[in-house]
Amino acid sequence: MNALHRSRRLACLGLLALAGFAAVPVRSAAAPLKIAYSDWPGWVAWEVAVQKGWFKDAGLDVQFLWFEYAPSMDAFSAGKADAVMVTNGDSLVTGAGGGKNVVIMLTDYSNGNDMIVAKPGIKSVKDLKGKKIGIEVGLVEHLMLLNALKKNGMSESDVTLVNTPTNQTPQAFPSPTLDAIAAWNPNAGQALKAVAGSTAIYTSADEPGLIYDTIVVTPQSLSQHRADWVKFVALWDRVLAYINDPATKDDALKIMAARTGSTPKDYAAFIGGTHFLSLADSSKIIANKGTGFDSLIGSSAVANDFNVKNKVYKDSQDVSSYVDFKLTDEAIAAAAKK
């Protein structure tokens, strides 16, 4: 079972408690940049650049390290990687645990892969009042549910949460004790199949920007090897072009599916629930200092409040300190020179 089949956004409190004791990664000038990643379309997309040799063409020595999601954060926090691919909310979790990091770019936002799935007869979020929802408390689906309730004039007190591990939601959903579940694909899709007539009444597509997927780097690596990270990010639009071009899309899907042990058809479905962001898109979202979900800062502030309230970590984080506001623009300029 690959990482997308398990806890993609695990809070990782236990394993991140060790992060404060981790050594700062020491990297010689000749050593490769080490990037920890896991199974999410916006991150597996980089496999195209790996297989096509584009990093070597750009004069970069990189090493991609494949993990499940939580262990990727653990490896980064332990100083075994220069960078890791995480959600914006989990960049804060990692940092609060001692694995200091800076977002250098956005790869995408979830656009339907995260869902609230309800049994027949429940047709809207408002119909959830008084119902029992299977959900892994403290993870991003919990945040999505709170967002859905708020938009419908409701609060958490209007429903009953039944703490359910995300990868167990498809098995738990048919139980008469649950009226709905919240999960991300493929678990959400499996839950839909498990109960005939069930429907997705709210998804991440209803709140674009609630869940941004990012690449974060240690402050030390960013300071010492900034030019290399600019070159790295500058390749992103080339990766997206290969995935989106009808002439090369099939090859891209084969590459991505092979990395995850999936099939091109299945991976195409995952991509359908992922809104890839070009570097220009990413730049606008990073530069926006507003409070809405069209702003990385705004989205991360909501995640920070959620994490503190639900005791994912104790101390509120300065979300602006987690963002490099210039590197994406530097990468755009570098790509334009070629």
Image: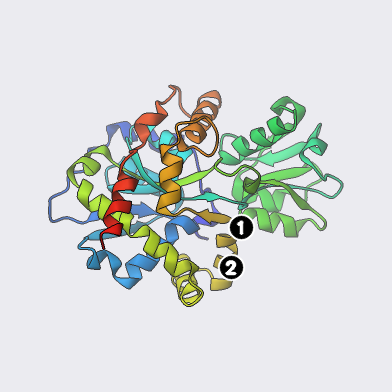
Residue at the image point whose x is 41% and y is 38% from the top: 287
Q: Distance between the residues labelled 1 and 2?
A: 10 Å
Q: Which of marks 1 and 2 is nearer the N terminus?
A: 1
* Residue 46 shown left or right of residue 310 in the figure: left
Task: Write down the residue under mark 2.
Answer: 266
**Image x and y of residue 257, in percent:** 49, 69
Residue 186 tag number? 1
Answer above or below: position of 86 versus 63: above
Residue closest to the eye, 152 or 177: 152
Q: What element carries label 2?
A: helix
Numbered circles on residues, count? 2
Q: Mark 1 Cα within 10 Å, few/some/many (few <14, many 20+)?
A: some
Residue 101, image quadrant: top left
Q: Do the residues labelled 1 and 2 touch (CB within 8 Å)?
A: yes
**Image x and y of residue 58, in percent:** 23, 63
Identify the image quadrant of the C terminus. Answer: bottom left
Residue at the image point whose x is 21% and y is 40% from the top: 223
Which amino acid is tagged 1?
Pro
Residue 275, image quadrant: bottom right
Which amino acid is tagged 2?
Asp
- Res. 96 visible in picture: no
Answer above or below: position of 186 versus 53: above
